Amino acid sequence: MSMRSGAVASLALAWRAAPAAFAGYVLASIGSGLAPVATAWLLKAVLDRLAAGQDGRLVLLAAGLALAGLTVAVLTELLRYLSAEVSRKVTVLSRDRLYAATDRMTGLAKLEDPAYRDRLRMGEQHSQSGPVIILDALIGGLQSALTVGGFVITLITISPWMAVVVLAASAPGLYAELQLSRRRAEMMTGLSPTERRQFFYSELMTGLEAAKEIRLLGLGRLLRRRMLAELHKANAAKRRLDRRDLLVQGLLAALGAVIAGGGLIWAIVAAGSGRVTLGDVAVFVAAVTGVQGALSLLIGRLGMAHNALLMFTHYQVVTEETSGLPVAAEPAEVPALRHGIEFRDVWFRYSDEHPWALRGVDLFIPFGQSLALVGQNGAGKSTLVKLLCRFYDPTKGAVLWDGVDLRDFDVSELRRRIGAVFQDFMCYELSAAENIAFGEVDGADELAAGHRPRVEAAAERAGISEVLQALPRGYETMLSRMFFDQTDKDDPATGVLLSGGQWQRVALARTFLRDRRDLLILDEPTSGLDAEAEHEIHQGLAAHRAGRTSVLISHRLGAVRDADRIAVLVDGRIAELGTHQTLVGTGGTYARLFELQAKGYSSEAVAG
């Protein structure tokens, strides 16, 4: 994105967000830029009349000076208000566009790319400050340019060569500021991985998730040292740039002071010889000071805008990003599943640098039947699920829904026909009711009215209903302690933390709420439960899956033995496929794994 297109995009964003405030801001900036020039000319007229002993119109000129001062004071406050108002509305619109863009990203490939994660983080940071900084810099630059133009015209009427000298002296400052702003942008981009690591260590040390292990293993000091090392690295880079900035700005300030001093000496000598009037001296001093001050502001604002525009590119790239998955020109309607789902010679890898996660998978999941996926870690089970949900597309081959390639469907419509609970399920820091009801939102802005009976039925099926009803506010209890304030921090009703197993049941209830879906995916649905709870849940899941098309992943083979078919994955390939009895009878990988687990349980029973 070029600087010009970035500036146009920023101004268009501001106009779209707050047209009235934006227009007022521009007009007030124009008035504020011209007011100092008018004040200088009025002062010149007053001084010249006083020096000549003419008292005519002095009262009128004095009133004009007072009015100019009042105008400057009012415009200053008006600009502050209008800038804040535009800033607030731009923040809302820019954030809305940013998160709408991330919501359009239906695939996971971009979100799992570290480089894109850095760009997204910087885009998020600058979605709030970037457009506002650019707007303030550009409009403020217009204000400064008007002031400079007015004072340059004033200087030309008194001493053309002095006007040339003052303007020429500003050229090095403009060049230096643009170079410094480019270096700042490059530094911020280069420091992104460093700051990401610093944030990672900070989150580890302050978060609850890793608190037990960090304290047990005594990792706090090590993590703190690493966090400080990243911080020192970032500070060193910023310090080098600040020192360069200090040197350059110091030299430019000295140059400006020499020019202003020389000009003052010339004006005083010229006034003494009668070549200029006392009013000319006053307006000359005001013009030189005004030009240098306005040029300094203009250069600083241009540098600020330049830097903000360079960083604004991250926001632009994110908001203009496509969905990450190919979109059919005319998506086919997703029919209710009636025949089955087929993986046809599916090959997949996450990038050209990664090994193949799936290698020529041919697999059919008949309608109304259950399929269990079994295999060691990294065998490709979760990858198959990601392709089923169309978080990724196959590198080669196709996944077919009743004979139609998933890529021919609208991805949102496809996912509305799928219910799933993942091994890394989410714990939303919201109420218990919302945590379950999210399973049936399907893109709606708010939860559907009258959802409570179905929420409670899903909780009952997941075996978590009694726990949630016993909470201080029942289903309306917050499952978090994040949002309490100081007045109610000791009130348990403000939030409750569930255990890992309880959270897993809540996640299951969220999936049960999607019981009208064509395909049910259960990825390690009971990994955090004890043996009795696991048996209870699997009994319920077996009843729930009966007659439904479902895919179950579990390392505990006793949980999958009742599946209609079991697929064993080895190194991304279907190594075995059949019922539990068939696979045990063949004496292959499944039989070996099942025997190992069965021996473990038998040994525990004998020891007991």
Image: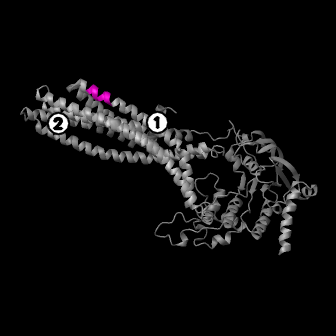
Say whether residue 527 is magenta.
no
Q: Quadrant of residue 49?
A: top left
Q: Which residues are magenta?
A: 163-169
- For label 1, the residue is 182
Query: Residue 606, can we see it?
Result: yes
Q: CA distance from mark 2 to mark 1?
A: 41 Å
* Residue 48 against residue 541 in the figure, above or below: above
Q: Secondary structure at mark 1?
A: helix
Say whether residue 165 is magenta.
yes
- For label 2, the residue is 43
Residue reaching furthest top? 161
The image position of residue 459, as x and y in percent, is: 68, 66
Q: Residue at x 54, y 58 (%)?
A: 224
Mark 1 residue crowding within 10 angstroms, few (<14) / some (14–19) / many (20+): many
Relative horizontal placement of residue 379, taking residue 212 as reference (left or right): right
Q: Amino acid at mark 1?
A: Arg
Q: Residue at x 35, y 38 (%)?
A: 249
* Residue 168 against residue 577 in the figure, above or below: above
The image position of residue 532, as x and y in percent, is: 77, 70
Q: Nearer the viewer, mark 2 or mark 1?
A: 1
Query: Along the polypeptide, which appears first: circle 2 or circle 1?
Result: 2
Q: Secondary structure at mark 2?
A: helix
Query: Residue 139, can we see it?
Result: no
